[in-house]
Image (tube, rainbow, N blue to C red):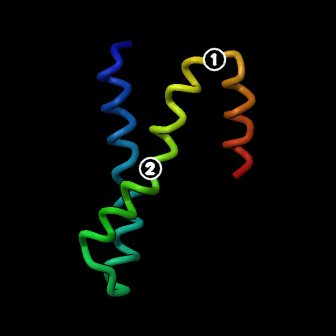
Amino acid sequence: MPYGTIVLAIAIHNIPEELAISLVLVPRGVEVRSAGFWCVFSSLPQSLMDAPAFLFEPFLPVGLGFAGEQ
């Protein structure tokens, strides 16, 4: 599967999550720019863990197990 397809799928998957964050923050008085920052910040761990997940593929099931516990 091409990497562009994976990136696009993750981006589409994140839209409802970020919309939910914005729909809570903006009515509570947070500026739209700040709400956008928090939306990006909430997805940052995904980007930070991409490279370690690729480099340490044998440990990926352990990481997914921890992610499922949240």
Calculate the distance from the C-alpha at mark 2 to the C-alpha at mark 1: 21 Å
Cβ–Cβ under 8 Å for marks 2 and 1: no
Instruction: Describe residue 47's horizontal placement relative to residue 26 as left or right.
Output: right
Which of the numbered marks, if any, corresponds to residue 49? Answer: none
In the rendered structure, which amino acid carries the disc numbered 1?
A: Glu
- Residue 20 drawn at (x, y percent): 40, 65
SS under mark 2:
helix
Crowd around label 1: few <14 · some 14–19 · many ≥20 (10 Å): few
Q: How many marks?
A: 2
- Residue 12 drawn at (x, y percent): 33, 42
Residue closer to the observer: 69 or 44: 44
Q: Residue furthest bottom?
A: 29
- Residue 43 drawn at (x, y percent): 44, 49
- Residue 31 drawn at (x, y percent): 27, 78
Residue at label 2? 43
Instruction: Describe residue 16's horizontal placement relative to residue 55 as left or right.
Output: left
Residue at label 1? 57
Q: Residue at x 33, y 69 (%)?
A: 35
Q: Residue at x 37, y 54 (%)?
A: 40
Earlier in the chain: of badge 2 and badge 1, it is 2
